Amino acid sequence: MKKILFFLLFIPATLFAQTAAGLFDAGNVFYKEGRYEEAIRSYQQILSQDQESSEVYFNIGNCYYQLNKVAPAIYNYEKSLLLNPSHSAAKDNLNFANRLALDTIDTLPITVFQKINSKYLLQLSYNTWGLIAILFSCCFVWFFLRFYFAESPFKKRSYFIASLFTFLFCVSSLGVAYQQYSEKKTRIEAIVFEEKTEVQNAPTKNSEIVFTLHEGTKVQVLDVVDSWKKIKLADGKTGWMPASHVKEL
């Protein structure tokens, strides 16, 4: 009976996987034929089945880029990089798409640690850093046991130093994983989808306009009041804009 139940559960899962794979292949065929809107529909059907992947978002971004739709292209490249920060092709294509955006936002000066964090640490997701921390913890236990049972002073000293370093690496990796996880949960970013939108100094229609943004600009969402969102740019400027004009990542 257990074998029959397993077989019955296995069939839908297999068919589901084949359906997602078939849609992905169909989308690739449509893309090669230049039928970008049909390709997008195929890829989005995969997402509707809760089958998110970096490659699916990357391909959707490519389709929108070919259609000269800046905001959707940037949005999907960003989504691809959220799932796989080391996706080099998504990074390159995002740079190309950002050149099509009209707004040029100067970033605020960053510290040395922020540069290291952006250039190296953020290349891996917090899940990967968590796995690295587990690996170093296993190495620490192994070296510590070798230190405990070693007989010669030289081996004891060597294993103790090795266990100390692996422990420090474990704690550091865990710290990076926690920092990235906390930032991901608290930091909300979005892409402007409106062709042109006015950012105001208060969440009301008659408030003063402080600056204007165009589609494709990336913003940080700080607060939400009714149908308004308070946003912040990379240069530190803040303001309120209609919530429907941005799409959160």
Image: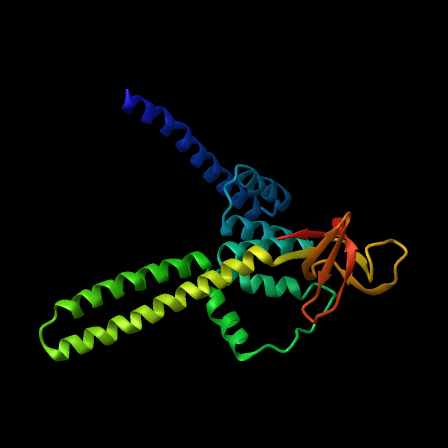
Residue closest to the eye, 215 or 231: 231
Farthest residue, direction right:
206
Does 63 appear above or below 199?
above
The residue that appears at 47% across and 34% down in the rendered structure is: 19
Residue 109 located left or right of residue 208: left
Image coloring type: rainbow
Residue 153 located left or right of residue 89: left
Residue closest to the eye, 33 or 99: 99
Does 111 appear above or below 99?
below
- Residue 71 in the image, given as x and y percentages of width and height: 68, 55
The residue that appears at 28% across and 73% down in the rendered structure is: 164
Residue 248 located left or right of residue 124: right
Q: Give the mark count.
A: 0
Farthest residue, direction left:
151
Q: Which image quadrant for residue 8?
A: top left
Residue 132 located left or right of residue 159: right
Does 197 appear above or below 7?
below
- Residue 238 in the image, given as x and y percentages of width and height: 75, 65
- Looking at the rendered image, the quarter that the N terminus falls into is top left
Farthest residue, direction front:
148
Residue 68 makes an appearance in the image: no
Does 135 appear above or below 26?
below
The residue that appears at 49% across and 75% down in the rendered structure is: 116
Q: Which image quadrant for residue 218?
A: bottom right
- Residue 190 in the image, given as x and y percentages of width and height: 66, 56
Residue 32 makes an appearance in the image: yes
The residue that appears at 45% across and 61% down in the rendered structure is: 177
Q: Which image quadrant for residue 39?
A: top right
